[in-house]
Image: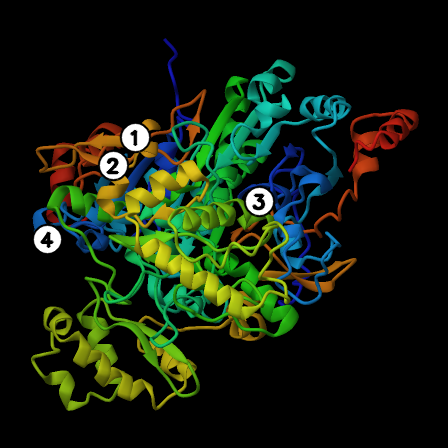
Amino acid sequence: MDMFENLLSGYRALDLTDEKGFICGKILATLGIEVIKVEPPGGDPARSIPPFLNGEPDINNSLYWLSYNTDKHSITLNLEFKRGRALFRKLVAKCDFLIESFKPGYLDSIGLGYIALTKINPRIILTSITPFGQKGPYSRFKGSEIVVSAMSGIMSTNGDSDRPPLREGPDTVYFESNAAAALGTVLAHHVREKTGEGQQVDVSMQEVAVKRTSSNLLVWEFDKCLIKRAGTIRTIGARSTHWIWECKDGHIFWSFMGGKPGSQGNRAMSKWIDDDGMENPLRVITNWEEFDMAAQDVSKDLLDAQQEAIRQFFLRHTKKEITEEGFKRGLNACAINDPSDILENPQLKARDYWANINSLKTDNPLKYPKYFFLSNQTENFVKSAAPVVGEYNDVIYRNELKLSAKEITKLESSGVI
Amino acid sequence: MLSKNSGVKDMAQPALQGIKVLDFGWALVGSLTGKHLADNGAKVIRVESSTRIDLSRTNRMVKISSGNNPDDKPWYTHLNTSKLGLVLNLKKPQAKSIIKKLIQWADVINENFTPGTLSKLGIDYNFVKTIKPDIIMLSSSAYGQTGPLAYEWGVDGTGLAMSGYLDQTGWPDRTPVGANAPFGDVVLPYINAMAIIAALDYKRRTGKGQYIDTSMVEVCVHSNTPNLLDYQANNHFRKRNGNRIDYASPHGAFPCKGEDRWCTIAVFNENEWQAFCHVIGNPAWTKDPKFTDMKSRKQNEDELENLISQWTSQYTDYEVMYKMQTAGVPAGVVQTMADIVDGDPQLREREFLLPIKNPELGVFGHPTPAYKLTKTKAKVRHAPSMGEHTEFICINVLGLTDEEFAELVGQNVFE
């Protein structure tokens, strides 16, 4: 039997982040890096983010926190205390990565900035994940998901035109910034293995999010045209079309696109409308590859009539019919999944996508997404639940730093750990 | 206006100096995966063909782009900076000898064709590893390389729908909506490039290569994990709820002076609430028990938002932001693309767009990596025109003689 390893087993990271940065450590932990969450006594304040297990607020019950701290260990340590910082320096000497999401300048102010860290461990990689980056006029601003989403321009393109701009449902800014931070961290590691020297990785959530709006930036830069929020319409050029539709029992994603990319789906749609015996304004198009609403010459009246027919068509069918029958017909529509649909999705099941994780206080394991990618040679999976506060204190303080029981008691009673 | 060029001298080689990548990537996911590697110094050979042209090379979102010139599309250039360009019709039998040489040359192969395409062309991983056993090869697709939906085509919205993003985005009384900006198509390339670089480290230590399979849908689902756990543990379906979240109030976008101008404000705790009240002048209503703690504010959120809107409407969006931020309250303007490209001093400081001259389009901003390595800086160069480096690659990289190259040209292999 093959013994699978992870891609980056044998390295250690200290994780000082809150909700702005803890997904980075989660991703790195799937690569096999030992990630130790260093929390203030009483726990990471992000442990108070709902939803909670059984609806009961408790530092070990946040399902949000549990989602994004899998496979980590937890120690408590108060960096505000001199003694806490001394212990931290000992840990820095023995680690490969440090991930943090403090306000820029905070680590410097307690004597643990990048330069100070290199004096303890020149190989260290410091990954800093902040709303706006380490330097610049907004760098000391406070930011959160919605604030950064607004400043990145994403929000200006999301929502119904008659209501305020909207945040996206999942915390996309945090998620994407942390994926970017994980890439930056591994990239810096690659350099370190060649040069022996670490460096700081400076991730600005705002800049990460702005990079998603590339095409909107271009439309402004070249044509001084502003893409704005337009509800279920996706703005793709001179003629914009709907991409989200109501159906009999929910909602459907199906993008009415022009040119070659949309041709297969459009042909299938036209055929299905015919088969349903409905009036079909799509039928007049014979060459879908040439039909491109991003070009100027498609009649708006025709597009409106076609979209009305598509709207009527979707209202006649259920999510299940549209997806199952739709895949056979090449329609390529997707149901807008709720959590139950996602957990039951046959594709994800067939790929063994779910990991059964026993979290604290649950009788039954919960299903977590198991991986970010698959490999034929290595296994980079989510394997264990997020830690309870301080579960690794003994291993680190007693076994590794060789502190005596008396010293540990003293540190506990003085609030250092 | 674009960000200024800082003129800082590179003190070190770029991070991926010396890494060689054979890049079949196209559309967004494949192109951006290769871009991350190329901007950081890998030598990336982008292989493409006019017989199955990349969608970003036909996109006419801006007026300067014509119907028939593949090189006048700024979106293509945004997605493909720093690469070398080779045109090659993979369907021509004579292309196989070039492909074999490229595989021998490469450390890494990146591709995101519809699953099954490379098998049909006879150049899937099983073939590749016979030529280069320790190659690192990455395939990405909407659903992954296996499973009942593997061969289905998907776009960014596929990930949004399948993962629950759309279920969670919008007003409770309306149809779901999504931003006019890709999500999974941009997140997956970060994971792809990370996996490739981590695999290079694994190869350094073990001598082994590997085959990596990524799915855009699967990466997107991670962003919805808290709701999946909430449903399993508590049998609770969280409904999309506009700008409101369960652990902050006020939390939303508030109207400001001017047409369609907004500023977001997010108050997470008592300190921020006190600071917020101070900024708006401690009006009497803030002392009303309806608003004095988070729980009561959540219960009276419609009224709270109306009262705040009356205050924010007296100021510009940037005035609201500065007043709040100065007092320690998280707040940010809902910036438009104009605000970002023409004005944002923070993004300019970070050189988020680097002005680069493109032969067809002139000078315009090209995206730099948003994760800044402080010592080994990225070096962003212009994207290749169609086949810009075909001859250079064949002769100088792969070692073809002039005669061999001319013969292949005569057989229309480079189209």
Closer to viewer: mark 2 or mark 3: 2
Q: Which residue is mark 3?
A: B36
Circle 1 residues within 10 Å: few <14, some 14–19, many ≥20: some
In depth, the one of A52 and B270 nearer the eye is A52
Q: For the point 40% across and 88% down, which residue is it? A: B257
Label disc, if present, on residue A344 of the rendered structure: 2
Percent of width and height locating residue A364? 11, 32
The amino acid beneath tag 3 is: His
Instruction: Give me the C-alpha separation between circle 1 and circle 2.
Output: 7 Å
Q: Are marks 1 and 2 in contact (CB under 8 Å)?
A: yes
Q: Are marks 4 and 2 in contact (CB under 8 Å)?
A: no
Q: Are marks 3 and 1 in contact (CB under 8 Å)?
A: no
Check disc 2 and report its element: helix, strand or loop.
Answer: helix
Q: Which residue is mark 1?
A: A349
Residue farthest to the top, as pictured: A1
> Are the numbered discs 1 and 4 placed on the same chain, yes or no?
yes
